[in-house]
Amino acid sequence: MNHFDYRNGILHCEDVPLTDIARHVGTPVYVYSRATLERHAQVFQKAVAQAGKVDVAFAVKANPNLAVLRVLAREGMGADVVSGGELERALAAGMAPERIVFSGVGKTGVELAQGLDRDIGQFNIESEEEGMELAAIAAAKGLVADAVLRVNPDVDAGTHAKISTGKAENKFGVPIGHAIAIYTRLAALPGLNMRGVALHIGSMLENLEPLAAAFGRIGTLVETIRSGGLSVSHVDLGGGLGVPYRPGENPPTPEDYGAMVARVTKGWDVTLMFEPGRVIVGNAGVLLTSVIRVKPGIQHPFVIVDAAMNDLARPALYDAYHHFDPVAQTREMMTANIVGPVCESADTFAMARECGAVRAGDLAVFRTAGAYGATMASTYNSRALVPEVLVDGGRYAVVADRIAAATIMGAERVPEWLMS
Ligand SMILES: Cc1ncc(COP(=O)(O)O)c(C=O)c1O
Ligand SMILES: N[C@@H](CCCC[NH3+])C(=O)O
């Protein structure tokens, strides 16, 4: 079931024509479907439940909008956060503190203390040094922090180098060969309750084999830790499942993933934790944009849209593909370079893309923009910060305002000593 579909020739999100949103909110704007978010949350949770006792924490970094988090909290998801800011968002959205996992390679002392004060469920420690600091802060507060050790299994996830996290040269976790020694030393500290291990080998994985290989290594590690007399009650398997960005693409489904997890983790006797991001929100959002004008090019025309790399950074950063569709359905096709107005050649959404024909003034969408879209937006070129809308059946709400360039300028100061 697709909640972004054409009805009477106009692209809708659920029951709302995107033309209505463009008219009332303006463009560019992110549009999310509540029904899709709910369906994805349900499908993922059901799929991993095949593996036994599980706990699912949404990776807030993928889409930290408060309304989106609220929808997911109502579907029973916890939160995986990577900063004090994300922690406060998860709590503000109504996520239970005990369902919050604090990941991140560089948590500061202030953030570790914040997590303890907020009584979160688990810290995912990324180094012995971090573990020692957390133990000391917890002990000084008379607390014991529940923690797992993030392990780097040295597996090639087969994804884009910039979003791969489980190779030895990546900054994440402790090398798997050092894990037992570090786990043993941390488990002896009074401020910590070491209860397991974690891994996350990368994002947008289109193949289950690297995940299965990494989980297999973790299974062996769990056995070795236990044989040393220490306990392991939790294993956090991270996130990373890919989604289809191109028509006809078929990455493994949550069901395939859940079945693989059940097979590989059989007999582990732990609570399995998951941190899905993209698979929950990616296809629940589009970036709605207007065509400013179409300019002739040498090989192909340039379709210049009012969204840019500051609104959706993924094509510029990772050469990522986002499908482009006109809001008014058409049979007429064109081959075009689709670009934004920002003064960089990197501000290119697609080169030589075959797409439905558009003209100046037309509306169009970039699909699969719900993950790592608005959250990575900036105000480069003194552009406004892009707003967000959540659709629910026939109604919608602006869930993040457009922040005008003038408002952002209002937070800047020219010191008095430069005024004369
Ligand atoms: C530790 C951790 N957990 C979960 C995620 C979510 O990943 P994804 O959006 O690929 O599911 C990430 C990002 O890749 C991450 O770094
Ligand atoms: N920002 C990346 C994903 C990063 C995952 C973070 N751990 C993307 O858009 O694909």
Image (spheres, rainbow, N blue to C red):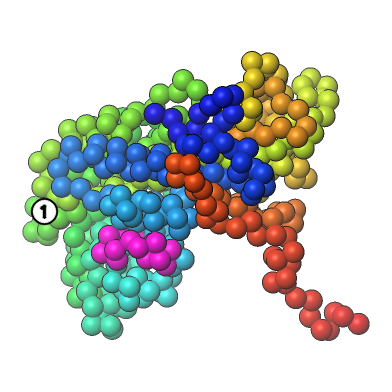
Q: Amino acid at mark 1?
A: Arg
**Is any atom of residue 225 visible in this view?**
no
Residue 152 in the image: state x and y as whole percent: 34, 48
Position of residue 400 relative to residue 336, above or below, is below
Q: Residue at x 28, y 77 (%)?
A: 138
From the viewer's perspective, tell me whether residue 42 is left or right of residue 31.
left
Disc 1 on helix, strand or loop? helix
Q: Residue at x 12, y 58 (%)?
A: 231
> Depth check: 319 or 251 in front?
251
- Residues packed near mark 1 inside 10 Å, few (<14), some (14 to 19) or many (20 plus): few
Position of residue 368 relative to residue 418, above or below, is above
Which quadrant of the figure has residue 38? top left
> Is residue 411 in the magenta section?
no
Q: According to the image, label 1 marks what residue?
A: 226
Residue 276 in the image: state x and y as whole percent: 35, 45
Quarter of the image with the C terminus is bottom right
In the image, farthest residue toward the right: 420
> Is residue 93 in the magenta section?
yes
> Depth check: 219 or 16 in front?
16
From the viewer's perspective, tell me whether residue 372 is left or right of residue 313.
left
Q: Residue at x 38, y 74 (%)?
A: 114
**Is any atom of residue 193 visible in this view?**
yes
> Depth check: 167 or 279 in front?
279
Range covered by the magenta-colored residues? 87-105
Q: Residue at x 28, y 83 (%)?
A: 140
Quarter of the image with the N terminus is top left
From the viewer's perspective, tell me whether residue 78 is left or right of residue 381.
left
From the viewer's perspective, tell me whether residue 160 is left or right of residue 151.
right
Residue 246 in the image: state x and y as whole percent: 51, 26
Position of residue 115 relative to residue 180, above or below, is below
Which quadrant of the figure has residue 348? top right
Q: Is mark 1 within 8 Å of ligand 1?
A: no
